[in-house]
């Protein structure tokens, strides 16, 4: 073959270099996940980088992610990281082909960055950097070996010919396969998860000393209307944890400290020995948009937080409790809301079972009247009694309000927005809430008609949402339906539209339906 100029030779050879670098990165990432599964699930390179990104993301980015992807926001983040990683890997392949060893250096550097971020995570341990370092080194070494084979000078001028390139592509395929196998192995080996799930399955919850009755008339039983109690499997999940913390109740403890007369530490056995209450409370996320579904209502079993605080005796200067999760998340709740007569709980049960792992097993907080971000700490490990002028919660330092009382809201569930409805007898129905204040009425407006009072289902308590419905004779054509709630204090839900940031969305839910 005639010696060609370096350009035409270089261009086709660049493709196998890119493929090889991406394949080496897939292999490295798979190995990193496998090592993490073996030594420390929370040190998974993806979880570490994703967790770091969640922590530094500005409030608007969180808001955007939740509004675009809802509870699939974590999957979206991980896919985004993977795409970015593969793009950088491809670029590193080009660099390695043209300016070795800089491509390898880039791949190793990604691993080093992951290792550094892992050390900055709240749950960092001695071995946390290992999975990321393994990933970076493996990717760099394999990319170096594969791309090295494409180098003409290494053997002979014709070394980088078709067969060599095809050979590199074949080896790249092997590397991708090995990376996928390693990743699959990491899933199978996530033994920590299996162990704690088994402990949870075997747990027996204590019997409550007081319970909250759910009247049969609390559920209107309308098709398509949210059931008054949300099954745990349908309950929304929002948190910053890419890997669900795995906590064995046997090793769990809660430290109550700060501005208290008596610092105390409660262990699982201490907690379950205290009198338990079963309550029903609606939990809602501050990121819930008008008409949104980041809300659920569940039965919670647990110990009133005021009983635990009473043992520690907060001092007079305290006005806030900063609850800490094992994963570094914190929430700032007004001390008042945790010590007044409301049922603020250290919950261990949800809908008759131990808390699901993703909902805070073994212990979380639930505080009626407050959005989740300032109250509902999952995997809770510490109650730091402090002051608003001394400390702030996770989302407050990212631009959200330091206090988060739940706003008055209502939502239309039936018909679904955009639904086609048959003319004749129809029903409009939904839910309304302002937890710990309570809903006194709901009104519905069809097109530009008068506001009509809806029928309210029986309320379980002021701490829960309430179902409502309105019979309607649907006439053909397109119709706009909106609703507004009236609280027990006489407030009518404001029509003014506000986005969730910084302290919760406002405005009326409105749907358009076509009647045929
Ligand atoms: N440890 C921890 N607890 C947390 C969060 C978190 O990110 N980490 N998010 C809070 C927010 S913003 C909400 S809305 C609720 C959601 O609880 P759920 O996932 O059980 O519905 O949990 C709260 N508790
Ligand atoms: Mo939230």
Image (spheres, rainbow, N blue to C red):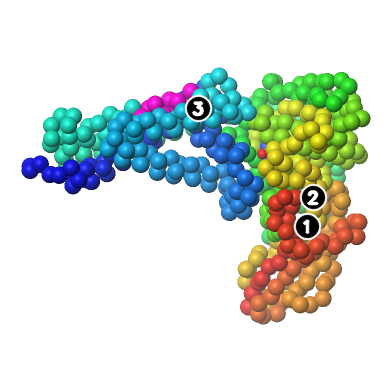
The reply to whether residue 359 is in sight is no
Question: Considering the image in quadrants, where does the C terminus appear?
Answer: bottom right
Which residue lies at the image location 50% right of the left edge and 35% below the top edge?
Answer: 46
* Foreground residue among 278 and 27: 27
Which tag is nearer the camera, tag 2 or tag 3?
Answer: 3
Residue at the disc numbered 2: 406
Label 2 residue SS: loop
Q: Give the range drawn in magenta.
A: 130-140
Which residue lies at the image location 76% right of the left edge and 63% below the top edge?
Answer: 496
In the image, residue 82 lies at what x, y percent?
45, 41
Which residue lies at the image location 82% right of the left edge and 44% below the top edge?
Answer: 368
The reply to whether residue 247 is in sight is yes
Residue at the disc numbered 3: 115
Per the model, the C-alpha gap separating discs 1 and 2 is: 9 Å
Q: Is residue 471 magenta?
A: no
- Asked if disc 1 and disc 2 are in contact, CB closer than 8 Å, the reply is yes
Which tag is nearer the camera, tag 1 or tag 3?
Answer: 3
Which residue lies at the image location 86% right of the left edge and 28% below the top edge?
Answer: 309
Res 409 label: 1
Label 3 residue SS: helix
Which corner quadrant of the figure contains ligand 1?
top right
Residue 454 appears in which quarter of the rendering? Answer: bottom right
In the rendered structure, the answer to whether residue 326 lies left or right of residue 457 reads left
């Amino acid at each position: 073959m005639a010696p060609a100029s370096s350009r035409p030779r270089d261009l086709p050879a660049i493709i196998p270099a890119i493929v090889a670098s991406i394949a080496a990165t897939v292999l490295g990432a798979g190995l990193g996940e496998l090592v993490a599964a073996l030594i420390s699930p929370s040190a998974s390179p993806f979880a570490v980088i994703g967790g770091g990104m969640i922590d530094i993301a500005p409030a608007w980015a969180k808001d955007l992610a939740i509004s675009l992807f809802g509870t699939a926001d974590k999957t979206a983040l991980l896919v985004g990281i993977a795409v970015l990683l593969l793009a950088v890997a491809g670029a590193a392949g080009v660099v390695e082909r043209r300016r070795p060893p800089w491509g390898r250096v880039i791949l190793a550097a990604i691993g080093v960055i992951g290792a550094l971020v892992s050390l900055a995570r709240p749950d960092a341990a001695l071995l946390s950097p290992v999975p990321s370092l393994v990933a970076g080194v493996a990717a760099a070494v394999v990319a170096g070996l594969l791309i090295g084979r494409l180098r003409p000078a290494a053997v002979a001028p014709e070394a980088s010919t078709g067969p060599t390139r095809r050979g590199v592509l074949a080896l790249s395929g092997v590397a991708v396969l090995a990376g996928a196998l390693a990743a699959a192995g990491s899933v199978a080996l996530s033994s920590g998860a299996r162990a704690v799930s088994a402990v949870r399955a075997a747990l027996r919850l204590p019997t409550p000393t007081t319970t909250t009755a759910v009247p049969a008339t609390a559920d209107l039983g309308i098709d398509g209307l949210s059931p008054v109690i949300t099954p745990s499997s349908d309950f929304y999940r929002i948190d910053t944890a890419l890997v669900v913390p795995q906590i064995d109740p046997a090793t769990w403890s809660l430290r109550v400290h700060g501005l208290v007369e008596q610092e105390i530490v409660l262990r699982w056995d201490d907690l379950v020995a205290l009198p338990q209450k079963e309550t029903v409370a609606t939990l809602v996320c501050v990121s819930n948009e008008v008409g949104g579904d980041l809300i659920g209502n569940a039965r919670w079993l647990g110990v009133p937080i005021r009983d635990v605080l009473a043992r520690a005796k907060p001092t007079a200067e305290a006005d806030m409790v900063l609850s800490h999760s094992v994963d570094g998340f914190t929430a700032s709740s007004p001390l008042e809301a945790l010590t007044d007569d409301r049922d603020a709980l250290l919950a261990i049960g949800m809908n008759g079972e131990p808390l699901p792992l993703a909902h805070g097993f073994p212990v979380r907080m639930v505080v009626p009247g407050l959005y989740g971000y300032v109250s509902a700490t999952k995997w809770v490990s510490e109650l730091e009694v402090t002051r608003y002028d001394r400390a702030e919660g996770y989302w407050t330092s990212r631009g959200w309000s330091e206090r988060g009382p739940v706003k008055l809201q209502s939502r239309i569930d039936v018909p679904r927005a955009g639904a086609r409805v048959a003319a004749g007898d129809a029903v409009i129905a939904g839910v309304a809430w302002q937890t710990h204040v309570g809903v006194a009425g709901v009104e519905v407006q069809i097109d530009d008609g008068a506001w009509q009072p809806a029928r309210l289902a029986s309320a379980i308590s002021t701490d829960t949402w309430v179902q409502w419905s309105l019979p309607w004779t649907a006439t053909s054509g397109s119709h706009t339906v909106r609703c507004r709630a009236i609280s027990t204090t006489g407030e009518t839900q404001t029509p003014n539209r506000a986005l969730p940031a910084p302290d919760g969305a406002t405005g009326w839910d409105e749907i358009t339906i076509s009647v045929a």
